Image (cartoon, coloured by chain):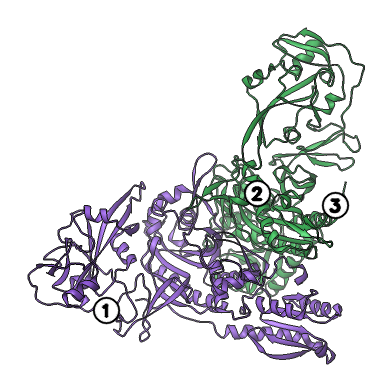
Chain colours: A purple, B green
């Protein structure tokens, strides 16, 4: 590829809205362009890098028995109504009517489509296990697209789906993915950790997320440096201290201006852990079969030294969505914001109590009367409700496995694996006949990797003050050939020689200054740079640098430039191969 | 790939709705499955075949300097409003509002998106010419999906876009595509002809379509067997005979029950060519800048021996859409259906007269009075209007170039190339600075190939009573290995040997009868079949057949099965290469 003929141009300045370094460089180097909020085009460099990532994914999916297929982006709504997700998924899924008025959706994932396929193909246990995957376009109307390809609305995803006769089969395919994903990310050069995760709208039980740790991430990951426990904060647990003591009698006390736990503890001169905190939310509950919505007030009670993890609260409540309650909504249910508790509230309120509260006694709680609290409230005696773990883990808390202090960090989710079990096969009647002739629902798993997001994380991870520096396995091309000599012929010769040998060369044949050419080479960041300068050419040599270390330069003999370049490429590739991560899934 | 592990199953019966042979076999052999009207999934065989077609397209596009990119399917409506196509394209384009109420469209083509990209990248004449392409998913809400992948709503298309400084540059890129398309189709093994075409909603001037001739086609192609003139009937011209004679005086005559030209000619004992036929249509005219629609009555006048070609009439009228007029609409404009003409009609009727009428005299036309016609009407004297070629060409008419009789046949459009000129660059302000510093609109071209439709045509062309028989360049795999022996080991050995040598093998390792295995092999139709039978194995041989000729069988030595198979594959590939069509565009 000649730079004089390249479709994309490089940009000297960071465009507006480039809210992360990786995004800025992908724009400036001409990898991607934005068409609208969360909607991007891939230009030649971005396209090439993406194809290389996809090829790595393809090889690893084929290696675990995956068969590649392609399912449509536009789905008839019928199949989404069958599983109920047409109703339970909110505005994130875009819908339209076709010309004859049929409901259509833009698929954000393909459990419905693949289950529809599978129920047509799978009849007997003899045909299982099966694994199919696709690398395909999806649309998700994200409310907050950001950071370029990190969070978009239209994106390319690898999604695979496994089909088995039993849990053992699913575990085997899950374990195969667990391992293959580490191979994929490490072959691309991306460091990731795996965390236990919430299955969210997928509806399965066991799931893991692959996280690239970075300050640009929006997920909070709780880890234990001592024993290796790792989970997304949405589901992370921790060892809670219980404070059990004999129950005392409840007593109403005046507590003016004590609307927060801090104010209350200071006023009463007690510790925060001696109080109970009430959080008021409204949950939306959607009927899976007809889409009817119902709102319900939920009060989450957690000990005053802890916080409510909304995701845990939503899961415990089995709500489709949660939002903070308005004052009037709380008052209507006989509770008083700032002085609220579940004591004396309407019977139709869903009370969910963290086990920290259930396992402590004599907590100070709101009296549901402006300016008053109750001393010595006790769950079970004074009020009831559903007990669950709804507290948010945080750095410094005790590890649930080894009790050592936990840490927290930010991460970007680049992959996820879910055990779906029969969530989709039951609602869509996808079954097989077992050896005894009985029909049983197929056991399914679902496994995703965001291709564009992976590129974005790589750009974030492999960049410096000058620009990108992607690993050779995913760089758009291997060699940047920079000619600084007036004689075009020598450049053409070397370009042709290298290209003819199958080496991917970006040849800067433009009539630009050395400064401009080097700045562009730094920005685009191909792994190997070969420079043609008068001085070295006189000695029959070309200057060579690795993008990752521009301080150091060496040289190749002009006569053996092809062989030496090939050897250097092989060396860089071997280096990456030496860093392939092999990790096995250990079932809890 | 082992058949025991294959995701898709074969079907013994043709499923409902399989309205063509190729479609039936693609379903039965497990290449594709339907998810909804005009919405299909590709199963492993269909996916593989499609990837091979795409790879051929990619190679030929790269060979003419194409740079591969990827643009989004979901487009913000803004860019479609800029060109006016948001308004001028009807229900074929699906639209929806995103979560914040912005108008979005599902792109059915990418002139808008690519012009938006190009105006950001192209600044100077120095950066031109450029050519970009993508192989990407599109959605077009076709009112009549049919014949499987022939006419669908979601489809994969290769679309390329050229950018030049002048017409000469555009001509060069157009010629390069013209030639590359013949190479692509012939490398896939599909026989096509190229025809002059209408540019329809694309809005350019010169365009060609590549047609696969077949009775399942919906396009009518007019060809001259003598000189090679070829065009889609929508735009085909022909040499019309003029009947010029001195004008006579108009005379009203009673013509009861003469509502058709046939009845009229018989009643008056004249030839049909001595009459003028009026066709009443309502055209929709859409304001490009605000989307306002206006309907207008159009009367097309053609000589009685000819028919009106609606596409020509629509182009002449510059209408966005046409439909037949209702009786009342015609009567309102002072014309009488069955006895109608442009004589005495309302001034706001758009009268379009075929040159056959303008160049003939003394035609019998409707008197716009029930039961009466006028003798000796003459265009120019008795009524006026816009003169254009709006007559439909047909078999037997005279060739416009050599006057010999024309033929007609049915075809499926598998590719098209358009000279867009400045249609999009002007409305979207995509310009370059020329050598003198002046800004000029970029000259564009647009070039498409329907990938799925191409596969569907291949399936149509390469099938017999037993099933498919795709050429080796596009077959999902190269070899079908059928084991009929009980000893699984020998099959495994050969399967592994062939696979390790890089040969694509479908290995029928199932416990099925020879009949079932051969029926499936016939249906799927991989080019080379290797059968393991007890008799030949005893002699140290395997039986080999080509799918295209199941009558003839030969054998390979077991010891050299890899080498002999490789040689046979190379022979089949060389055969196809020998049939590559090289055709140059000759500008009119």
**Mark 3 residue crowding within 10 angstroms, few (<14) / some (14–19) / many (20+):** some
Question: Which chain does the numbered disc 2 sit on?
Answer: B
Q: Chain of mark 1?
A: A
Secondary structure of residue under mark 1: loop
Front tag of 1 and 2: 2
Q: Which residue is mark 3?
A: B585
Can residue B57 be seen in this snapshot? yes
Same chain letter for marks 1 and 2: no
Disc 1 + disc 3, Cβ < 8 Å: no
Which of the 4 quarters of the picture holds residue A350? Answer: bottom left
Q: Position of residue B282 (x, y in %)?
A: 66, 28
**Badge 1 vs badge 2, beta-carbon distance below 8 Å:** no
Q: Position of residue B288 (x, y in %)?
A: 66, 42
How far from the left and from the top, in percent, is residue A147?
53, 68
Q: Secondary structure at mark 3?
A: loop
Position of B14 with respect to B562 (left or right) is left
* Residue receiving disc 2: B82
For marks 2 and 3 on the same chain, the one whose residue lies earlier in the sequence: 2
- Chain ID, mark 3: B
**Corner quadrant of residue A263:** bottom left
Label 2 – label 3 distance at C-alpha: 33 Å
**Residue drawn 88% across the image and 12% down it:** B248
- Is residue A361 toward the left or the right of residue B122 in the image? left
Is B244 drawn above or below residue A277 in the view shown? above
Q: Cα distance, mark 1 to mark 3?
A: 77 Å
Q: Mark 1 sits on what residue? A: A239
Q: Measuring 37% from the left and 57% from the top, which residue is drawn there?
A: A440
Res. B551 in view: no
Towards the viewer: B207 or B21:
B207
């Amino acid at each position: 590829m000649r730079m004089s003929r390249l479709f994309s141009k490089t940009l000297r300045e960071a465009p507006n809205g480039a809210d992360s370094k990786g995004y800025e460089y992908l724009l400036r180097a001409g990898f991607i362009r934005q068409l609208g909020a969360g909607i991007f085009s891939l230009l030649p460099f971005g396209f090439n890098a993406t194809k290389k990532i996809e090829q790595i994914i393809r090889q690893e999916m084929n290696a675990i028995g995956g068969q590649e297929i392609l399912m449509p982006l536009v789905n008839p709504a019928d199949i989404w109504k069958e599983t109920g997700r047409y109703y339970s998924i909110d505005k994130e899924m875009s819908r339209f009517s076709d010309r004859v008025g049929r409901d259509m959706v833009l698929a954000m994932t393909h459990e419905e489509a693949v289950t529809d396929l599978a129920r047509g193909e799978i009849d007997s246990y003899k045909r299982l296990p099966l694994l199919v995957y696709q690398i395909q376009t999806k649309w998700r109307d994200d409310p907050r697209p950001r950071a370029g390809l990190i969070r978009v609305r239209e994106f390319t995803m690898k999604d695979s789906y496994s089909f088995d006769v039993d849990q053992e089969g699913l575990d085997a395919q899950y374990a195969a993915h667990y391992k293959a994903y580490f191979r994929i990310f490490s072959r691309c050069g991306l460091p990731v950790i795996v965390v236990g995760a919430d299955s969210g709208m997928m509806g399965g039980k066991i799931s893991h997320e692959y996280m690239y740790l970075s300050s640009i991430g929006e997920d909070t990951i709780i880890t234990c440096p001592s024993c290796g426990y790792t989970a997304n904060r949405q589901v992370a647990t921790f060892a809670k201290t219980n404070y059990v003591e004999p129950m005392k009698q409840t007593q109403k006390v005046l507590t003016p201006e004590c609307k927060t736990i801090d104010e209350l503890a200071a006023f009463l001169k007690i510790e925060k852990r001696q109080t109970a905190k009430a959080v008021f939310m409204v949950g939306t509950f959607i009927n899976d079969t007809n889409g009817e919505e119902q709102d319900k007030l939920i009060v989450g009670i957690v000990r005053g030294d802890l916080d409510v993890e909304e995701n845990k609260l939503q899961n415990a409540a089995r709500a489709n969505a949660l939002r903070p309650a308005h004052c009037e909504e709380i008052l209507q249910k006989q509770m008083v914001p700032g002085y609220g508790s579940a004591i004396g509230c309407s019977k139709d309120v869903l009370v969910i109590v963290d086990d920290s509260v259930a396992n402590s006694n004599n907590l100070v709680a709101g009296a549901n009367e402006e300016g008053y609290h109750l001393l010595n409230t006790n769950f079970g005696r004074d009020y009831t409700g559903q007990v669950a773990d709804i507290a948010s883990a945080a750095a410094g808390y005790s590890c649930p496995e080894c009790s050592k202090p936990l840490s927290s960090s930010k991460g970007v989710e680049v992959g996820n694996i879910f055990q779906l079990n029969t969530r989709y096969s039951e609602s869509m009647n996808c079954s097989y006949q077992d050896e005894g002739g009985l029909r049983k629902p197929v056991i399914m798993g679902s496994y995703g990797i965001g291709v564009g997001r992976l590129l974005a994380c790589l750009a974030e991870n492999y960049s410096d003050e000058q620009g990108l520096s992607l690993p050779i396995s995913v760089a758009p091309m291997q060699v940047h050939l920079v000619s600084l000599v007036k004689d075009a012929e020598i450049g053409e010769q070397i370009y042709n020689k290298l290209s003819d040998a199958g080496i991917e060369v970006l040849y800067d044949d433009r009539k630009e200054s050395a400064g401009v050419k080097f700045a562009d080479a730094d920005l685009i960041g191909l792994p190997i740079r070969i420079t043609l300068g008068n001085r070295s050419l006189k000695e029959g040599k070309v200057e060579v640098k690795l993008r990752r270390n521009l301080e150091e330069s060496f040289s190749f003999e002009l006569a053996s430039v092809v062989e030496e370049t090939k050897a250097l490429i092989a060396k860089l590739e071997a280096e990456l191969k030496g860093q392939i991560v092999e990790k096995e899934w250990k079932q809890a």
